[in-house]
Image: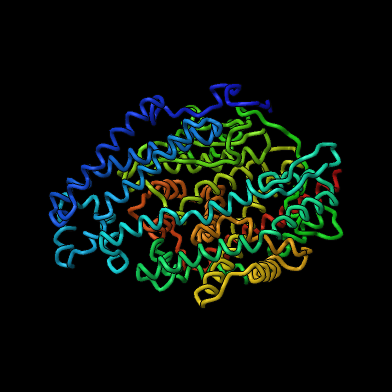
Amino acid sequence: MKEYKNRKEVEEKYKFSLTDFFQNDEEWEKEYQTLQTNIAILANYKGKIKDPHKLQEYLEKMIPLSNSLLDLYVYAYLQHDVDLENKTYLEMKNKILNLNVEWEQTNAFFEPEIIELSLEEWQKLSNKTALQKYKRWLEEIYQQKKHILNAEEEKYISLLSDTYSSYSHISSSLLNSEHHYGKIKLATGKTYEIAPNNIRFLKQQGTKEERRKIHHKFGKTLKQYENTESFLLHNYIKNNINLAKIRNYKNPWQRKLEQVHLPNEVFENLKSSAKKYASVWHDYFKLMKEVLGLKELHSYDLSLDWGKNNLEYSIEEAEELIQNALKPLGPTYQAKLNKVFQNHYIDYCQYKGKVSGGYSFSTNTQDSRIVLSFKGSYQDILTIAHEAGHNVHHQFIQENNPSWYCDSSTFVAEVASLTNEFLLNHYMANHVNDQHLRRKSIEHTLKTFQNNFFGAIMEGEMEQEMYEHVEKGNLLTAEYLNKLARNAQKEYQGLTIQYDKYSDLMWVTRSHYYMNFYLYSYAVCVSIAAILAQKIIANESRILEQYQTFLSCGSNMYPEEIYQTLGIDLKDPNVFENAIQYFQEQLTLYQELEKEGVKNE
């Protein structure tokens, strides 16, 4: 794969196009100025929401302005991420963030006025024909009656919440910018600066002794700042608890359940299934130790690839491979997938001055754009398939819903992306002759499932225990968090892995603990994706029709309702146990291919 020094060197065909958002920065600035002027118009509706005609007027003006605000933000965000050294886009990003604060303050009256309606007033208002298309959205607000405060109080909460993300930002800054983890010279002769964004790569490249040194250098630095990190996490959680109480929730967990419209039973089933079949995860690590030929499997060995595959793919080859692998999804899906590739929705190449990693970012009115760090590996192809899944999902949503419902719950959103990964891995395992690549594809399936299911549940339960600890009036100390991590790892991962004092610090590097119980969404979505992939591969009757219906559901439907389109009841523990069975089958398949490979080699 060609290496690039900067963005100017990258061919235009490998960059995303944002002209559907704005033709250029000047057009962005013009739209920004227009929005800044028009926001004030919305304040004229304060105190008038009881009038159905005024409410309709307000919504018809507010929604396009809200869409404009999001388009402005995403354009600036994307331009900044692909050109971090360009101060223009950093300034644009800060401008729109400041405008967002003004937006929230101007519209702070809206929800409280809906909430203040009596039941009779609400029923009269919500039954108006002209407002029916907004009914589920308005219901969502009215159902929060006991949790929304008056307009003045909401304004102050908005101001306080503006600094709420500072804890995660400080933690991220410390980890990624402030701390210095030292250097490591590998047997290859190259010397690297150790950092959170390359530590996995360095461990993969290094010898066992080098991996140990990297692990200890990194851990030694984290150990020096563990008290600061525990203080940040404690205050974030304490703040979250206080905000929940201010809004009349029992605790943040109750708030989460009400927000996602899922019963606690779903999460209890998740945890009980993971614990009931923890031995399957233990078997995964036993197999890993065996395949790698290690006498001892340490926590710093877990990022190792099981088998080497040095094949390198061009961007064109990657696109063709994905198109072939996803053919079982049918022509309608294929047409939307082709749009991703043909319409320049992906920014492929990595260079200095571009954010690392991969993500997909959409708005209510625009298809998503995808940012990647493509280097030609099979893992990079999986990332394309994953992010393209998000894009196609959003295309289906946009085609079938008005803009105010063009959103997806986190407990649904990852299904489309993970299903694509499983389908691509299945294709590689069954359509290539290279035995190493066949095993590699199954290895990726195993890693994807174990990380998103078992790993996410383990850490999700840790997060719940952190909240319970603080709710009882306790302090989140580094000592407590280290012990919590050690016990969780031993219970879920088993005793095959050798742990040390630096293994306990895994909580320090997890940004998900600043995302309000986000981890469980991975476990739900990977379970459904595993089940869906099997049905699609088997070409079950009506599965494509059901899947397209599922992909077309907007935020006017709750997760349980959306999953019902697939005939899936999340309260049924068999859903998660069937997903674990898929993981177990893939584990057995890998063992068989490994034996076959050893015999042939």
Question: Is 271 positioned to the left or the right of 189 in the image?
Answer: left
The answer to whether 32 is drawn above or below residue 223 in the figure is: above
Note whether residue 198 is visible. Answer: yes
| Identity of the residue drawn at 30% across and 44% down | 402
Q: Position of residue 365 (x, y in %)?
A: 35, 38
The answer to whether 167 is drawn above or below residue 438 in the figure is: below
Task: Out of 180 and 554, give the one closest to the viewer.
Answer: 180
Residue 92 image-quadrant placement: top left
As drawn, the residue found furthest toward the bottom would be: 472
Give the number of callouts.
Answer: 0
Question: Is 41 positioned to the left or the right of 315 in the image?
Answer: left
Colour scheme shown: rainbow
The answer to whether 213 is drawn above or below residue 500 in the figure is: above
Location of the C terminus by quadrant is: top right
Question: Is 532 positioned to the left or the right of 595 in the image?
Answer: left
Task: Out of 208 and 73, give the one closest to the viewer.
Answer: 73
Q: Position of residue 152 (x, y in %)?
A: 26, 60
Location of the N terminus by quadrant is: top right
Note whether residue 331 is visible. Answer: no
Task: Out of 77 and 371, give the one closest to the viewer.
Answer: 77
Q: Position of residue 24 (x, y in %)?
A: 41, 25
Q: Position of residue 229 (x, y in %)?
A: 61, 60
Task: Out of 318 and 331, give the one closest to the viewer.
Answer: 318
